[in-house]
Each structure stands twice: as structure tokens, then as C-alpha cells.
């Protein structure tokens, strides 16, 4: 079965920002926030301070993964140039997204460089209140002026717009506002990360939310979905139920498998992230093939 990882990260250096301030490496694959909280952010197989394109490729090759989409955000810190260089070095293996802060005083100049000069065709916005836009800025209306400026920019350049709205019950988790906003850009392609990050007990909330976002120009990646169902472990029955519901509500052709490596691999193996879908007992084989490969191929790698 062919595989594309639709949600992965390269990391030149850990330089994130979040609700706990700046995030910096402290050796051994660990990182520390300004509050003093430390945690394991990189698995041992990647190294102490970074996650190189070659490290990702080793993991991909060991597991038969053809390609990966390199996303980014405030969690590791924006890695635009490093992502660009990874895609340029391995154009047959990687597609890359650019990220930026829309509140930057020279945002227009930044966007011109990323999308007009470097040629990124995907933009990633993490707006979560944990480690995204709303962790360092006041709450932003996803159907408001600030975000519509960025949606319009992406629509004018035919960019794929990837968005992570955080977890349910957080200030950034604005499903209705996002649905209204997306409806205004019917020709633009949106990807919503982590299948909206449902927690254990969120089955009905997820069904309602997927119903609002079941639009013809919206895809959902499944990266780290299973890790939100702790303390469950592989095969993650709750998260598998959420995938089954998503197939029923939005269709298998709108779902994208992703791993969220490298950080997700501090909590479980890459093989389990694959088998979470590949061995799902309730999915048809043709649906697994769509989720694991064909949907991402058509969306992110249409010319290869």
C-alpha cells in the first residue's frame, strides 16, 4: 500500500513561542518553555536539537512512505527557509508550506518573499491558543477582518490553506466561524488539521462540527488524532471511531493520513501511526488507499 505523510515537520532549530513564552532546546531532544516547563520534543532517532530532512527520509524509507508534506508553526518556530531548502533538495519527496505572523509590521513584504520569490504553494496557519496565533495575540475571529485578509491573499494566488484551530473548548476552536469563512472562498482548497483534535468523549461534538465543515473544498488531516485519546494506546479505539464517523460524514476522499512527526514519535511509533489507518478493521481497502495516499497525491503532488 502506497503512503504519503500529509503532516510532518523539519526543524533546523527549536525556536518556538507559545502560551508559556519562548521554547528553546536544552539537549537530549528536550525543550524548555520560559515558564520552566521542560519536556521531550524530539525522539532519540532524530537527534538532540533538530530534525533534518534526511532524518525524516530515513524514517519514511524504513516504513515505505513515498512523500511527505512539511508543515510548520509556532510550536517549533517558523522554519520557512529550512523547509524551502528541504523541498528544493528533495522535490520528488517533499512538498512544503510557508507560515508567517499576520500581525508582523512588514507582513506584506514577508508574504511577497515566501510566495512570490520562493514560490511556496501552501500556507499553514496554526491559530491555537496553546502554541499558535492566539497564544501570543488576543483572540482572533476566524471570520473576521484579520483572517479574511489572509484568506483573500491565498485565494488570489491559488494557495492551499492549511489551518489548525486547536482543541475543542479553546478560544481558537471556532468551527462555525471557520465554516462561514470557507463558504466565501468556494474555489480555494482548505485543509483542517488533526480532524479538529477531538478528545475522549467528543464524539457528538465532532459529528456536529464535521457536518458544518463538510464542504466540497475542505479536507481534513488525521495527524496525531490518536494521541488525543489518551490514556488509550494502540490501536486507539476511540480515535478509530472518530475516523469511521469522518468517513461517513465527509467521505473517505476528504481525509489525509499524517503522522505529525517528529514530535508525535516521542509518544508512539511511526509504525503505529500508519497501522492506525492501514489496519483499521472498519474501513474498506479502497478507502484506506485514498486516505493513506491518493487524496494527498491529488491535492499536494498533482504533477508527480
Image (cartoon, helix red, strand yellow):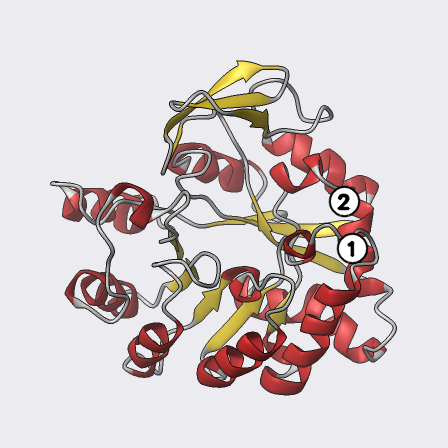
* Screen quadrant of the N terminus: bottom right
The percent coordinates of residue 28 (x first, y second) are 64, 15
- Direction left: furthest residue: 105
Q: Which numbered tag is attached to residue 270?
A: 2
Could you tell me which secondary element the residue under label 1 belongs to?
helix
Q: Which is nearer the eye, 46 or 211?
A: 211
Q: CA distance from mark 1 to mark 2?
A: 6 Å
Occupied quadrant, residue 27: top right
Image quadrant assignment for residue 149: bottom left
Taking the spot 74% from the left edge, 43% from the top edge, the residue there is 60
* Residue 151 or residue 196, whichever sits in front: 196
Residue 193 x, y percent position in the rendering: 51, 60
Judge from the rendering whether residue 196 lies leftward or rightward of residue 63; answer left or right. Answer: left
When the figure is inspected, residue 59 is found, relative to residue 298, above or below; the finding is above
Residue 29 locus on image (x, y percent): 62, 21
Name the quarter where the C terminus is drawn. Answer: bottom right
Q: Is residue 79 visible?
A: yes
Q: Which structural element holds mark 2?
A: helix
Name the residue: 44% across, 50% down: 97
- Position of 2 relative to 39 (above/below): below
Instruction: From the viewer's side, name the closer residue of 20 and 51.
Output: 20
| Labelled disc at residue 229 | none
Residue 136, position as x, y percentages in the image: 27, 41
> Is 64 situated left or right of 30 in this image?
right
Q: Report the side of 268 relative to 169 (left or right).
A: right
Instruction: Using the image, determine if residue 67 lies above or below residue 244.
Output: above
Residue occupying image coordinates x 59% and y 79%: 204
Disc 1 marks which residue?
274
Q: Marks 2 and 1: in contact by CB < 8 Å?
A: yes
Q: Quick check: 162 left or right of 227?
A: left
Amino acid at each position: 500500500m502506497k503512503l504519503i505523510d500529509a503532516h510532518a515537520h523539519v526543524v533546523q532549530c527549536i525556536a518556538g513561542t507559545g502560551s508559556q513564552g519562548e521554547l528553546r532546546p536544552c539537549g537530549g531532544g528536550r525543550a524548555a518553555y520560559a515558564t520552566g516547563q521542560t519536556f521531550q520534543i524530539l525522539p532519540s532517532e532524530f537527534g538532540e536539537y533538530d530534525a533534518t530532512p534526511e532524518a525524516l527520509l530515513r524514517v519514511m524509507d524504513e516504513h515505505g512512505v513515498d512523500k511527505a508534506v512539511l508543515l510548520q508553526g509556532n510550536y517549533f518556530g517558523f522554519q520557512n527557509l529550512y523547509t524551502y531548502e528541504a523541498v528544493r533538495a528533495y522535490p520528488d519527496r517533499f512538498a512544503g508550506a510557508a507560515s508567517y505572523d499576520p500581525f508582523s509590521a512588514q507582513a506584506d513584504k514577508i508574504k511577497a518573499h515566501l510566495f512570490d520569490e520562493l514560490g511556496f504553494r501552501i500556507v499553514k496557519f496554526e491559530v491555537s491558543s496553546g502554541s499558535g496565533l492566539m497564544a501570543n495575540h488576543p483572540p482572533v475571529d476566524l471570520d473576521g477582518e484579520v483572517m479574511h485578509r489572509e484568506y483573500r491573499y491565498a485565494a488570489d494566488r491559488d494557495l492551499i490553506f492549511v489551518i489548525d484551530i486547536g482543541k475543542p473548548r479553546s478560544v481558537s476552536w471556532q468551527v462555525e466561524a471557520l465554516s462561514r469563512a470557507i463558504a466565501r472562498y468556494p474555489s480555494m482548497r482548505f485543509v483542517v488539521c488533526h480532524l479538529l483534535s477531538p478528545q475522549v468523549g467528543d464524539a457528538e461534538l465532532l459529528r456536529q462540527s464535521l457536518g458544518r465543515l463538510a464542504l466540497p473544498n475542505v479536507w481534513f488531516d488525521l495527524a496525531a488524532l490518536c494521541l488525543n485519546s489518551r490514556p488509550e494506546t494502540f490501536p486507539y479505539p476511540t480515535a478509530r471511531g472518530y475516523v469511521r464517523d469522518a468517513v461517513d460524514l465527509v467521505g473517505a476522499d476528504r481525509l489525509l493520513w499524517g503522522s505529525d512527526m517528529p514530535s508525535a514519535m516521542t509518544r508512539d511509533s511511526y509504525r503505529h501511526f500508519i497501522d492506525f489507518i492501514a489496519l483499521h478493521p472498519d474501513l474498506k481497502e479502497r478507502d484506506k488507499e485514498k486516505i493513506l495516499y491518493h487524496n494527498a497525491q491529488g491535492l499536494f503532488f498533482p504533477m508527480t
